[in-house]
Amino acid sequence: MKEIRLKLLPYQRRVFQSQKPIIAFVGGTGTGKTWLAARWIVLKALEHGGEHLAISPSLKLMRRTLWKEIKKVLKEWGIDYEKNEQDMIISLPCGRIYGVPADNPERMEGVHAKSAVFDEAGQVDKRSVFETAFRRLRYHRGQLLITTTPYRWNWLKELYDKALAGDPQIELVTARTIENPYYPKDEIERARREMPEWRFRMFYEGVFTKPLGLIYPDYELVEPFEIPESWLRIRGLDFGYNHPTAVIWLARSPEGVWYAYRELKKSELTLDDLYNILKEENIPTYADPEMKQGLETLRARGLDVRPAKKDVLAGISFVQGLFKQKKLKIFSSLNKTIDELSSYSWKLDANDQPLDEPVKENDDLVDALRYALFTAEGFRATAPAYKPIKVDFL
Ligand SMILES: Nc1ncnc2c1ncn2[C@@H]1O[C@H](COP(=O)(O)OP(=O)(O)O)[C@@H](O)[C@H]1O
Ligand SMILES: [Mg+2]
């Protein structure tokens, strides 16, 4: 029998020793997450046989990292295997490893896996990929290993908080980049000097932080669902030439909760392309009034495009209020909107105090969001409560 010797760092050993159904290894960049994920899944496959899942945020990332590392380990350990790169399957003497890109989670359906790893899971805002993987493991009571840096406050933060609160199902292992002696120290120091502190703490210390002066710190994600026909729908639109054009679709539930359910963000989109997308659903669309030309063209072609109210501060404050009161939620499938929400910040003064002005960066969808909500609700607020009565004297 072949002997495999693994030299583990102390925090990596805790991962290998855990028997819990979910192991969340939340660590800084370069803490050996992918190194560990590949070895853990290969050993599980060799030990138990059967089917195993190796999940990455996308096919491209998977081929560059986890998939590559798995093949490297097999070679290093002198284990024979066959691979099918087309279908992303590695067959071992006993057991198989399926590569699953998180944007194609259907690949997991029908598989009763004995273990799964999800590398850089925090990049995938949709909770359903994690849930599907966990569900596919229940038949064999297999373990799920998550190896990730914190990226944003999504389902992973909730899982992390649950673990901190003592959930017996979850083993939480954390590590800072500096704890990996193989990682160059001067690189860490350079990052510490050059990055905003919150970013450094997130990516090199593995703790969930938020940028200083975040404008919408309270945004909440929900799993996508079918929007009922009867709900009111509107859109926000921010035209761009050099900047991307951004559109966000919103629907209001009978309880008065807004759901952002669809997004579009694309550079060099022609007015024709935009028209073709918007005409799929001709709903009130609140657009940047300064782009008169575009606005008039779309209207002339029959779309319900209306000029948005552009009072930036009042608009932001209105949207903040909606988030605070839990009257605005974002579908977790809206990656680009979530990316903007998690970085859209106030400018800071020399003492890091927020000023009354947003940083004009990566703000296309958040602007579209504000145009739609502020204008639509604003109109309602100022509309007369009753129709004037016309009296005719005979
Ligand atoms: N136990 C270990 N023994 C030897 N090298 C390790 C060990 N853990 C991690 N490394 C090395 O540390 C570096 C970073 O690992 P990697 O898995 O790419 O980090 P991450 O995925 O966390 O960014 C790699 O060069 C890897 O080979
Ligand atoms: Mg990695």
Image (spheres, helix red, strand yellow):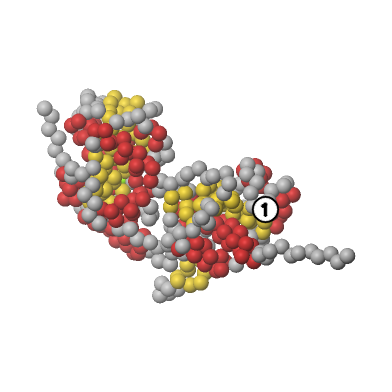
Q: Quick one: quadrant of the N terminus?
A: top left
Image location of residue 363, percent across then percent down = 52, 58
Image location of residue 375, percent across then percent down = 61, 61
Res 35 seen here: no
Of 256 and 15, nearer the camera is 256
In the picture as drawn, the residue positioned furthest to the right comes out as: 394
Q: Is residue 259 toward the left or the right of residue 238 in the image? A: left
Residue name at image x 81 percent, y 65 percent: 391
Number of other residues with Cα within 10 Å of mark 1, as a class: few under 14, some 14 to 19, many 20 or more? many
Of 28 and 141, nearer the camera is 141
- Asked if the residue at label 1 sits under 8 Å from ligand 2, the reply is no
Q: Is disc 1 placed on a helix, strand or loop? A: strand
Q: Quadrant of residue 292?
A: bottom right
Residue name at image x 79 percent, y 64 percent: 390
Image location of residue 97, percent across then percent down = 29, 31
Residue name at image x 41 percent, y 46 percent: 126
Q: Which residue is mark 1?
A: 305
In the picture as drawn, the residue positioned furthest to the bottom comes out as: 351
Q: Quadrant of residue 196?
A: bottom left
As drawn, 69 above or below 269: above
Q: Quick one: quadrant of the C terminus?
A: bottom right
Image location of residue 59, percent across then percent down = 40, 37
In the picture as drawn, the residue positioned furthest to the front comes out as: 394
Give the amino acid type for the residue marked by disc 1 in the picture: Val
Residue name at image x 41 percent, y 72 percent: 352
Q: Is residue 116 toward the left or the right of residue 243 in the image? A: left
Res 181 seen here: yes
Ligand 2 is in which quadrant of the figure? top left
